Image (spheres, grey):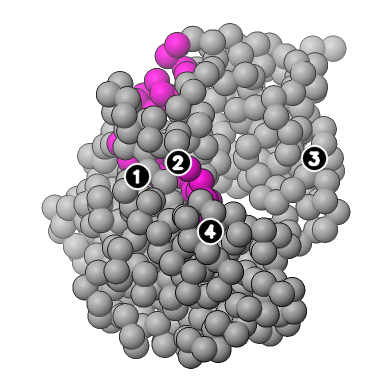
Amino acid sequence: MVTARVPLTPHPDRLLPVGGAVRPIARRLYAAVRDLPIISPHGHVDARILRDDTPFTDPTALFIQPDHYVTRLLHAGGVALDRLGVGEGPLPEERAREAWRLFCANWPLFRGTPVQYWLASELAGIFGVTDRPDTADPDALYDQIAAQLSDVRNRPRALLDRFGITFLATTDDPADPLDAHAALAADPSVRTRVAPTFRPDRYLEVAGAGWVDAVKNLGAVAGVDTGHYDGYLAALEQRRRYFVAHGAVSADHGHADAAAIPLERAEAARLYAQALAGEVTAAAATAFRRHMIFEMARMSCEDGLVMTLHPGVYRNHHPATLAAFGPDTGHDIPTTVEFTRALRPLLERFGTHPNLHLVLFTVDPTVYAREIGPLAGFYPSLYAGVPWWFLDNPAAIRHFHESVTEIAGFGRLSGFIDDTRAFCSIPARHDMARRLDAGYLAGLVAAHRLDEDEALDTLTGLVRAQPRKVFKL
């Protein structure tokens, strides 16, 4: 028995308000920004993909393996991660096809999630797919996409141009030589600015596995002796300067909490020595990391790197999955977080510093109106990061606007952040944000709180001017 194919037809009004008076306004606003260039100040696409510009190998490697949004929902539905090739490189063709068949057979697991919106937009908009993924003929769909991947128009750099991405930030280890970024910057055929992002988390968590070897290597790369605290600081400062010289605009930090509490220099040096000797306690390691977040803010005031902070995630919640597949494979889980007291020492010292831009992100929506909005509504250095990760969905984005812009205004927002490892999802994610922002602003126009020209100026600013301002582009 052959199952009938079901059309995949993303509706032109998807995500726009349903109400009759608001939708026409939202349509006009969205149309004005739909095709504006994409600025992506934070993401996880590997710069080597763009440097090498080799064709994507197959649909599974493009849509499934790198996207933990996809794999975690499939895993929750009973699909083992090893059957999807999680944590592996390109799969042999038969395994890639089997993973694709599982993806298609479990398409209903994505219903009602932004993942379905992004995937449908990618499949239809990039590869011209007109049939919904299902059990009818997954191999035919696989072949349809695979045949296009060898086309020069679908190689990574061509897609970068096709997507209209003018700025793309990656996420990079401080010891990375950034040779891929240097090659891209030197290539006149690459019209997108691809910038590294300084991500020092593993060097601040002194009780972490492999920390001693990591800071020793950092010192070797920086040409500094990290056998003492002053050398450790100097190595981080030197690598930050190196990143700035290679086009970096931000330093990104994600720890268990947001606390930034400075220590006396002698105490910090003592704890650092304990960590090198393998004798640091968990409490001391936390105190040192909180001290170093304060130090990172000081360094940002000196070298100009925007400081983005996204605390409150329980990393690697499932030890067996971590052991088998590694980190960033879908089992990081949100926790509650507090900013107001946690950041007071940092903001007391640097909150009005003209060179600091601090962007607060969260996966705990309870802090939007209680803390992030009020903080962004006072401190000139502080901006509210838009919803991301578990909150980059329509309901949370609308709630964010109701919670934050009512308190701090649109001018205190970061602009949209896609935060993705799945390259082809970048335009779909930005499109979703533009539609939702247009809908929210259209509601303000319909309620006579804004004139339409104000709404249009605000929406255009969120897409174009705001991320350039916040990330100092």
- Could you say which disc has been placed on residue 81 in the image? 3
Q: What residue sits right under mark 4 in the picture? A: 219
Question: What is the distance, in whole Å, between disc 4 and disc 1 at their CAs?
Answer: 19 Å
Q: What residue sits right under mark 1 in the picture? A: 246
Q: Nearer the viewer, mark 4 or mark 1?
A: 4
Question: What is the distance, in whole Å, between disc 2 and disc 1 at their CAs?
Answer: 8 Å
Q: What residue sits right under mark 2 in the picture? A: 178
- Disc 1 marks a residue whose amino acid type is His
Ranked by sequence position, the earlier of labels 2 and 1 is: 2
- Disc 4 marks a residue whose amino acid type is Gly
Is 50 drawn above or below residue 66 in the view shown?
above
Question: What is the distance, in whole Å, between disc 3 and disc 2 at their CAs?
Answer: 31 Å
Q: Nearer the viewer, residue 88 or 446?
A: 88
Could you classify mark 3 by the number of other residues whose Cα lies within 10 Å: few (under 14), some (14-19), or many (20 or more)?
many
Q: Could you say whether the residue bearing mark 4 is in a helix, strand or loop? A: helix
Question: What is the distance, in whole Å, between disc 3 and disc 4 at their CAs?
Answer: 37 Å
Ranked by sequence position, the earlier of labels 3 and 2 is: 3
Contact between marks 2 and 4 (CB within 8 A): the answer is no
Is residue 212 visible to the viewer in this orientation of the structure?
Answer: yes
Is residue 153 rendered magenta in the image?
A: yes
Residue 188 location (% of width, % of height): 27, 24
- Disc 3 marks a residue whose amino acid type is Leu
Contact between marks 2 and 1 (CB within 8 A): the answer is yes
